[in-house]
Amino acid sequence: MQTLFIVAILALGFLITFQIAKASEYVAVLRGEERARKQSNKVNAFMLLAFLIIGLIGVYYCNEKLKGKILGDPASDHGVLIDRMLYITIIITFIVFVITQVGLFWFAYKYQHSEDRKAFYYPHNNKLELIWTVIPAITLTVLVGFGIFYWYKITGEAPKNAMQIEIVGSQFKWEFRYPGRDGIIGKKYYKNINGDNPLGQIWDDAANHDDIYVAGEPMHLVINKPVKLIIGAKDVIHDVGLPHFRMKMDAVPGTPTTMWFTPTKTTAQMKKETNNPDFVYEISCDQMCGKGHWSMRGEIVVETQEEFDAWMAQQKPKYYAVFPDKDPSKPKTDTAVKAAVAMAGAQ
Amino acid sequence: MSEATHIHPGSVGHEVAHDDHHHGHHEQSFITKYIFSQDHKTIGKQFLITGIIWAIVGGLFSVLFRLQLGFPGQSFPILETFFGHWAKGGTIQPEFYYALVTMHGTVLVFFVLTAGLSGTFANLLIPLQVGARDMASPFMNMLSYWFFFMASIVMISSLFIQTGPASGGWTVYPPLSALGQASDGSKLGMDLWIVAMALFVVSSLLGGLNYIATILNMRTKGMSMTRLPLTIWALFFTAVLGVLSFPVLLSGLILLLFDRNLGTSFYLSDIVVAGEVLPNEGGSAILFQHLFWFLGHPEVYIILLPAMGMVSEILSVNSRKPIFGYMAMLGSLFAIAILAFLVWAHHMFVTGLNPFLGSVFVLLTLLIAVPSAIKVFNWLTTLWRGNIRLFPSTLFAIGFVSLFISGGLTGIFLGNSTIDIHLHDTMFVVAHFHIVMGVASMFGMFAGVYHWFPKMFGRYLNATLGYVHFWVTMIGSYLIFWPMHYEGLAGMPRRYLDKSIWKSFNQFGDLDKMITVVSIIVFAVQLMFVFNFFYSIFKGRKVTSTNPWGANTLEWTTPINPGHGNWEGEIPEVHRWAYDYGKDGREFIPQTEPVGANESKH
Ligand code: HEM
Ligand SMILES: [Cu+2]
Ligand SMILES: [Cu+2]
């Protein structure tokens, strides 16, 4: 019903416009085309000027209305650099934007057709053209300079003390792996992936024995401690997007990627700062990955070292879940041994 | 050969030249005149009308998915009536949403703004403006249209199959596009997409080679390269870009076809999809992105350059002033064409690309802004102290410049890899390329249609409808795409059909509603333009003089309704460049007028 109503209104509006348009053409023929043309020229010239003025006001209004909705201060050290680069660029481009748009619409208005004016024959001026080649070139050099400087900082080697975490995307979820006490993420091979071994860890690699697998709950990070994410994907390309940290990196099956940053605000701090008790750091998938792409959501908790250690203490290596008899905290039982043997046989 | 006024049907390869240039003899059948025509003007119209139909389809898709974005989860029962299980309960299902987005992008980028735009205006303008009776090979030219037509048929047929059309985005990145298990759209629909695009590439090559050959070899006497109107230069560079980059896309797609159907592993490695462990190892998913963007980036200029050329021409004609800095305009076109090949990896800054390589691409990418800036300043100076006639064509040309500025400037954000880390694959990118490529090129196309419609059909488009069309589209485009940048600055990813489960991106509900409502209005006004177009072909006001705009270029020396062969007598000789407007107190001096003894030099 509603749809029909909208269609009817559009059709009516169209009919009216068309009648007016046709009538104005007849009138033009009657009154002399030249006069009609002059009149519409005036109207449109005025409209161009009005568009410029209202448009610039609109740009201001839009900014006032929406600037509060973009994510606030960055929550990582790299984010600070990225925002700084962003604001430098906004300032420079905004100046160019205003100058050129004002010039464009103002000229179109000012030099609208008039009998009294003769167009100025002005085919070229090498000096002018040189000026507006050199000025953009210099401006861009500055932007490129800053950009590449920050870029190398952000994409350079992670600090030695960085904590390593693996993050793996698959349709349409995120899984994490912590290196455990040895600080080494164990080797994996995709053909080992099955229900008990979601990442395909190679159990022969001792580095795997203490690795902590986490899924279905947030990734935990420590404030002010650099973190290096080892990023992978199982099926199609995904992308680890961390809008609050201003970071992003593709997750590509077959080709691991990495990214590092240092979170600078705990989740608790952010709740206070944003006056939002429900605040969470979110992981968004930014690369089209199938019908659930829009819902591929993960969470991150940034906390103090103590909180992190307390959380970590509760986690159990995946290895023990697969080979319960190897778990020192569990007494050996017959069934567990049998299960382990069966598992090993299946490998 | 160059004097061939009529080309017989079925005379493939050995066209018959006639010495007589009388009018209206040799009755052509309807089929050879309007369907399998080898007249470049008719082929141009075929491209245009097919392009318009595609634009309606592609535009309608965007209205549908905007409904979902503006009113997520709301039920529109009418959708279920039309689309059945794709819109179960009247809400657009995710598979359907992604199919719509993918087809929207594919259709508008390739079928409308590549074929519809270059196909139309290269065909119409190249022979007319360089002074040739037709293309170098009218037959290949005809084939170019019919390959495009076949591509269209195959692409459309993919909409009607059980598993639906391709749905992995217009960039069709594998492994998603390679694995049927990963998405319904990657089943048969994807094969059809590849076949359609392969046909499209063939069409584009046949057309492009023809355009290049015609411009290089078939210029009339006196038409040196530096006397060519900028439209022709732009179309020339467009064709060169297409000829050099489309084959790379084709090769990338063929490898994809192999991966899909023959078990090869070009793009596939280490994959477990839907619980199934695939045997493929050693491929690289990123390889496809390199191949794709090696076309993809030039492609955006293939779309933009014709618009730039037409805008230059139209602004000059209607300011009654020469284009400012012809050589600089030419140089910047050339620079853009070269650089277009050297920046593709700026679409891949966060794929794990080597950071050093990334920085090289930052440099090259931001270099493109220099020729772009030159063009903008030269357009502004062309308007400066002109005597501007604001026809719908002029307004669209001015709108083009405004949009090109806005969208070009956001390119400087994205080209800077540091900022791109945050903005990549967000709504900011969507806003950027719609403004600078989508809407701007559409504006160039509209400007061209309003300007050359009298040449195509011997009638005018209704100007009042043209003004309404311009103003609603101009205001609407900014309302739709300007605020969208803020969504991107907030980090909102592209291709999210519902943000309600997100805490970081769900604050833009009202904005999304507004955008959807405006899109519907803008779409309706485009339908009004289409109506104006077809109505005016038959009922528009008749053109009464051969040169209604008072322009210098050669197409306005032909009869109002030129036959095949364009000029009735000899092809006119050219004595000057195309931009002598307002010189020595004369409003315009056609290219065919010899240089007078006392004429001032410029
Ligand atoms: C100053 C000039 C420009 C620069 C520096 C620039 C830079 C960029 C960059 C870096 C991206 C990738 C962003 C991302 O995915 O993260 C991009 C995307 C895009 N640009 Fe531009 N651009 C410029 C002008 C243009 C022009 C003139 C066009 C078209 C005529 C264009 C069309 C596109 C398209 C279609 C995309 C998105 C492709 C996709 O991912 O679907 N850009 N631009
Ligand atoms: Cu995704
Ligand atoms: Cu690009």
Image (cartoon, coloured by chain):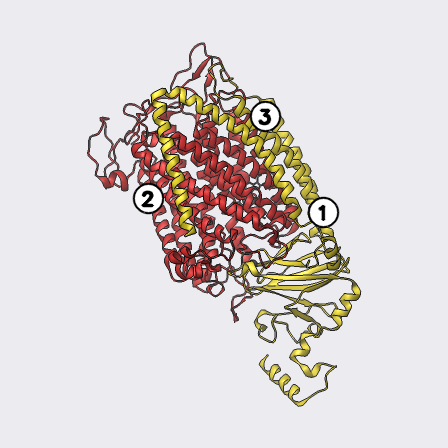
Q: Secondary structure at mark 1?
A: helix
Question: Are tags 2 and 1 found on a single chain?
Answer: no
**Location of residue A218 by image quarter:** bottom right
Q: Chain of mark 2?
A: B
Q: Quadrant of ligand 3?
A: top right
The residue depicted at 57 percent of the width and 62 percent of the height is A253
The residue depicted at 24 percent of the width and 34 percent of the height is B16
Chain appearing in red on the rendered image: B
Instruction: Please name the residue that numbered disc 1 is placed on.
Output: A81
Q: Nearer the viewer, residue B541 or B16?
A: B541
Q: Position of residue B56 (x, y in %)?
A: 40, 45
Instruction: Please name the residue that numbered disc 2 is placed on.
Output: B143
Check disc 3 and give the amino acid type: Glu
Q: Earlier in the sequence, mark 3 or mark 1?
A: 1
- Whether B279 is drawn above or below B452: the answer is below
Regarding residue A90, the answer to whether it shows in the image is yes
Instruction: Please name the residue that numbered disc 3 is placed on.
Output: A129
Horizontal side, residue B501 vs residue B207: left or right = right
Determine the residue located farthest toward the bottom in the rendered image: A334
The residue depicted at 44 percent of the width and 21 percent of the height is A38
Horizontal side, residue A241 vs residue B124: left or right = right
